[in-house]
Amino acid sequence: MPEQVLAWATRNADAVAVSQGVVKLTYGQLTARAEEIAAGLTAQGITRGDHVAVALPRSPDLIAVLLGVWLSGAAYVPIDRRYPVPRRRVILEDSGATLLISDEPGDDELGVPRVSVEALGKSAPGGRTAGPAEPEDLAYVIFTSGSTGRPKGVMVEHRNLTDFVTADARLDILPGQSVAQLAPVSFDASVFEIWTALAHGAHVVLLQGDDISADVLGKFLREVEPEWLFLTSGLFHLLVE
């Protein structure tokens, strides 16, 4: 999957890949930042097959970090920062994450070594060593809501993700089109919003903040006028009303 994003950076490096308000990253800038993150992860001992937890706010840097995890050979485990501490500990334990990327010093108490995004960007002496991801390598592990009593991790391989973003003719996203990014990265709707867009040379437009209300969402959509977005039916009807 990451090679599709890298290919767009080669093809059209100056096209906008990700934006949030006035902050924009082109495909060239996004992949350069991701390579920097990947090199930092390699310096931390991360290698192919590892699981790296990510607990960061919605931002262009978050997208670069997720891509950087892939370029290091690892799979990412997204964690909503608003989860209670016990739930975050369960996810870290069950996923087998060997590292947590977080800018919150309080996350040092979660039982997994923590590194900040800033530190990753400064600890890249030799570049990344991982080769291209194999189709059977894990891309990410997303945990269910835990409605049965305990969250369960759903493991998705790169070949599954590639099939999802390329095989459905209804997802005919064109280069340069915009895709709204509304879902928490710990919710699998974010996979459509982020990776289907970046695999097609499109532009991911990030909502500001982690919380969504109908008023905030309506204002955001009127401002950015995205060609694509994903809404649950309940949120759609609330927004229409």
Image: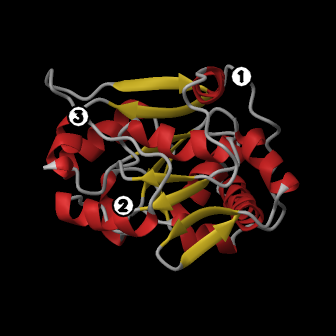
Q: 176 or 100: nearer the eye?
A: 176
Residue under circle 1? 135
Q: Position of residue 115 (x, y in %)?
A: 51, 63
In this view, the mark in front (2 or 1) = 2
Say left or right for 178 vs 95: right
Task: Answer left or right for 101 relative to 238.
Answer: right
Decide: is 222 above or below 148: below
Residue type of the residue flagged with mark 3:
Ser
The residue mark sitting in front, 3 or 1, is: 3
Q: Callout 2: helix, strand or loop?
A: helix
Q: Earlier in the sequence, mark 3 or mark 2?
A: 2
Q: Are marks 2 and 1 in contact (CB under 8 Å)?
A: no
What's the mark number on residue 221? 2
Tally of marks: 3
Q: Residue at x 69, y 35 (%)?
A: 1
Asked if 214 appears above or below 122 in the picture, the reply is above
- Position of residue 80 measured from the top left corner of the image (x, y, whole percent): 31, 51
Q: How packed is label 3: few (under 14 Cα within 10 Å), some, or many (20 or more)?
A: few
The residue at the point 80 percent across, 36 percent down is 132
Label whose residue precedes the other's in the sequence (3 or 1): 1
Residue drawn at (59%, 45%), measured in percent from left and top?
Answer: 197
The local crowd at label 2, few if under 14, some if 14 to 19, many if 20 or more residues have their Cα within 10 Å, is some
Residue tagged 3 = 233
Q: CA distance from mark 2 to mark 1?
A: 35 Å
Secondary structure state at the residue bearing disc 1: loop
Location of residue 157 in the rendering, given as x and y in whole percent from the top left corner: 59, 24
Tag 1 or tag 2, which sits nearer the N-term? Answer: 1
Element at label 3: helix
Relative depth, front residue between 85 and 34? 34
Q: Residues within 10 Å of mark 1 (few under 14, many from 20)?
A: some
Q: Name the one closer to the observer, 32 or 218.
A: 218
